[in-house]
């Protein structure tokens, strides 16, 4: 099923699992996919920034995307990150992913874009490259990508391309941007678009209240994202915040640029979801001290949320 | 009393209070200073990035620094941010501040520095400019300043200058950097230096455990910083984290780049510490929705920490 | 006489002359001003990027600007660079310069600006700060300032502010931008504005043909700029290029970022216009090898242009 | 024949020829290769920044590299640019290129590198990836790549890797860097390394005099580069400068970032070397006015250098 502007809920950002020798770990892709489906994710985004996508060769990217897609089957929608330095590689991965059954693709702006026109023109060319029948997600992540898009520029990109159905919002600070975009929708200048928020979930509590439709991020407890999204939609504000706040110390720890991926792979490995926490080079390793800090945070989260109560023996594998 | 490498505890980063018309609010400087002294801060850093320092003229900077210094008297040490585009202005403010009784000055690297040599040479020239008898604080804040200093570069800067007595650490991620610097101190390659941490306090819990000597940041509840620093030093780990975690949702909210200052001035105004939350242009205003979010966070913090229980009437002034 | 949108010809960008000990060299300011007037410059821009403006304290900036202005008298228009990290300092220098008799001021965007709105808003606030009765020059210099302005953004800034009378164009590549702006003027969407070009003059030949009104740059032979501007206006294309090409090897050498200022001060000193080639720290010194290269280039230029024939004895002072 | 530290002379940076519909133009690859061999280039570097490398898919890159290599046969050495966002793609292209008969590969640092350690570590990992038996060229191009390497860092990279045999020097300003590196070689701290200079050739005259071993750049008249390199090596300084200066107005025009490639493809097409001046998107088109300017510059160069006298009929194809 293709992605539409009505998409909502929680899309996990998946890491790409590697074996200790750097080869892709197909079994862990399967395990990861099953895990996301089991906890109730609405979808999974693969080959994003957190997915170490630039470290893969073209053929590997296709293989990884296809494996996630096939495993997810009709249980979850898979979005494939197709950002690339050139449109040829972007087009190729987008078409192969869609052929394999992806729900859509995600595109981030390349770091050299500066002016409003440069940004909107880039996305026009990107849509020309992938074809206007491929549903796509616009990624807005200035902290890492250094490209700053105003709400009006985001609106223009979306209104220029019927196939843009979702915004992955991860500007920071970003709450006022959600409000601005929702106001555009209210005044009719922006058509319906799904807004899922990233940035490690560190502002998910208020992002939902500002009008976001859900979460798209890689926190190693997607269950928490799902719960906060659902509680928030039901209007159970205090409950949403209570649960969110219990996780926030760990969310914050995982959100650290660079190191965050190592932490997430460590936690997912502890949870038994992936076999190895290995990254391809260049990667940031997690130190023993950081592992102990994460373990401590997990034990504290577990006081409120039993799901963080990970059996100590699995820790040995870390 | 001049700043030494033994400095520890909590140094508040002070905003510069303005009247609604943009003039400097001397009375609120006094009130702010008294407040910091009363809650138990060891010192105050003025005219930092959060202090809107670049928006002041030279004479204004001197007046603001002097007023803080005189009011603090012998109750607290005042550190004056003297970062400037040129060494003439840096020298002038440093000397005038020290004459007025400042404990030391703080210097951040200008954004164009790239190589290790460029960075270490810059600080050599800065020390030449202010004189090697002025105790100074090295500010390491890559997220905002775009200058990346390795632990070895920081060590070299400190070992090159006897008058460098403190590091304001606000790299992010930054925990491993604290550990690296402490290891340098253990192996004797780095002399004793005070390490106070910034970044809004968002990692203060673990920074203390990694070896930091205290906090230097602008969270509008310096009481929390003081308590976490003290509990951590006493080895009361769980208590430190319990208190820290209760504040983390608000700490996170205040730490947002740009907007953070507006939030802090709003909270300090609510607390009755400053008269107006006005900033000089260009500044980011806090929206009604953001105020409501902060009020909600305050009410949640107040469940654990009575000091966040701010009387609703003062809110009207916001 | 105040600067107007009809300004044209050659405005020299002046270095700030220092004595070897770093103090400002008032006598050389006088000599430099006389020199520019004598060779036929229409104006001089002081305290620009090349003028080491950020290395001066507030009072020094005022003194330097005033000295240039007084010396120029009614012989040339003086434009004062008032770019500053904050509007208070910008306003102060602008008002004092205008009071002293400046023709106008020049404002460059601060490096953090990214989106079109951020840029246009910044200049609105700048005009609010200096007052809308002060004629000002918009500096467009992305290579150094990292702020990229499209022709449409430049047009909006100019159309938003009646007191913006001139563009200092130094984008690179920049020829198409001149053409775009001239086309805006032809289609009536942009009012008359003086366009003077910078970038060391390295494209002056074609910039004039594209529609520029003159040159504003710091080449140490302003006579060449004046001649190329005049020949170009007369339509003597080949003559303009012949003369320009003879100087291009030196123009290119002087245009090097950072080192360029050292080269220019060296040449101006050789020409007897300023007493010392000293820069305030941090500065780039010219090596003996570079001096020899400049001397060789001068000797080659002198084959076509006698004015480059500088007596060897003055070289000894370098 | 593999590339060694004794490499010298002129290596052309080749554009990648495309047909008007964006497909790779194999025939023009052959023509281009023949042309470079015929005029006397010592080698050709393909898939560099100017070669639109990021716009190709993996398989295309291999095909382009292989075609150049096969066509060059034993007439010229081919260096293949293998810079990539990840080491998997870098390794793959490097190995396939070497298998096909490449003389070596070229690697540029990715833009996010900042500290000296980050830079040297990156190249260690790169050499791990491609294997230490593949001769490689270190590209130093801060203006485009934003990575600043001091002479000491370049030395460390070279001394860390025996297979690093050449520096593509294109820092700007860059003359003192060549001198610093040559001084390292003289004092024995840096082993023999070939230094070829880029930056469009705009400083080739002095770069040779400072100690460079030759040129590696994409000027559309490689004959000029060859002549200047040879005259310079023979010590015929004035002749070298005379010829160089005649071309400098065009060299400067071609060196413009972004537009430069369009100019070069236009000139190469006029010379009959490639069939189309098309670029893949995103690309910068050359305007009619720019074409006329280039034609004018060619006619002026042709007064001194008959090789620039391109028959007008070929112009019609532009």
Image (cartoon, coloured by chain):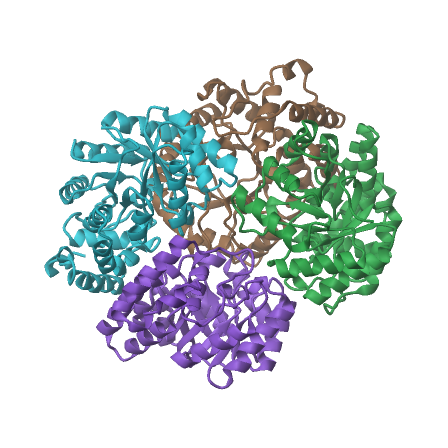
Chain colours: A cyan, B purple, C green, D brown
Please name whichever residue, C5 or C260, is drawn nearer the observer in this view of the structure. C5
In this rendering, position of residue C230 left or right of residue D275:
right
**Position in image of residue B299 (x %, y %):** 30, 64
Q: Is residue D247 visible?
A: yes
- Residue C275 image position (x, y, % from top left): 81, 62
How far across and down, in percent of the image, does residue D284 sit? Answer: 55, 29
| Quadrant of the drawing holding the C terminus of chain C | bottom right
Against A212, residue C315 (above or below) is below
> Visible in this render: residue D47?
no
- Relative to B135, residue D104 above or below: above
Residue located at (49% from left, 39% from top) = A113
The foreground one among A177 and C41 is A177
Which residue does the image show at 87% across and 47% down from the upper left?
C39
Is A254 positioned to the left or the right of C155 in the image? left
Res. A166 image quadrant: top left
What number of labels is visible?
0
Residue A304 lies left or right of residue A88; in this view the side is: left
Q: Would residue A245 be found to the left or right of residue B35 on screen?
A: left
Which residue is nearer to you in this view: C37 or D221?
C37
In the picture, residue C271 is in which quadrant? bottom right
Residue drawn at point x = 52 percent, y = 30 percent: D14
């Amino acid at each position: 099923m293709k992605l539409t502007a009505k998409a909502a809920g929680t899309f996990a950002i998946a890491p790409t699992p590697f074996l200790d020798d750097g080869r892709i770990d197909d079994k862990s892709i399967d395990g990861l996919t099953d895990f996301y489906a089991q906890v109730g994710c609405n979808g999974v985004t693969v080959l994003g920034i957190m997915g170490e996508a630039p470290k893969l060769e073209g053929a590997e990217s296709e293989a990884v995307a296809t494996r996630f897609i096939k495993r997810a089957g009709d249980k979850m929608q898979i979005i494939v990150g197709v950002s690339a330095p050139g449109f040829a590689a972007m087009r190729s991965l987008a078409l192969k992913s869609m052929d394999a059954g992806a729900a859509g693709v995600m595109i981030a702006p390349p770091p050299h874009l500066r002016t409003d026109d440069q940004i909107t023109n880039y996305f026009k060319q990107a849509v020309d490259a992938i074809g206007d029948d491929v549903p796509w997600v616009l990624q807005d992540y200035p902290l890492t990508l250094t490209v700053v898009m105003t709400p009006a520029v985001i609106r223009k990109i979306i209104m220029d391309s019927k196939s843009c159905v979702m915004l992955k919002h991860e500007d920071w600070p970003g709450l006022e941007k959600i409000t601005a975009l929702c106001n555009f929708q209210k005044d009719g200048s922006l058509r319906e678009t799904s807004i899922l928020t990233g940035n490690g979930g560190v502002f998910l509590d208020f992002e939902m209240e500002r009008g976001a439709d859900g979460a798209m991020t890689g926190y190693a407890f997607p269950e928490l994202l799902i719960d906060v999204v659902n509680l928030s939609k039901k209007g159970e504000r205090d409950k949403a915040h209570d649960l969110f706040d219990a996780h926030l110390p760990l969310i914050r720890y995982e959100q650290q640029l660079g190191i965050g991926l190592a932490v997430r792979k460590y936690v997912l490995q502890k949870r038994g979801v992936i076999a190895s926490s290995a990254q391809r080079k260049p990667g940031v390793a997690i130190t023993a001290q950081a592992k102990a800090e994460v373990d401590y945070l997990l034990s504290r989260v577990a006081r409120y949320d039993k799901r963080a109560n990970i059996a100590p023996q699995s820790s040995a594998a870390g």
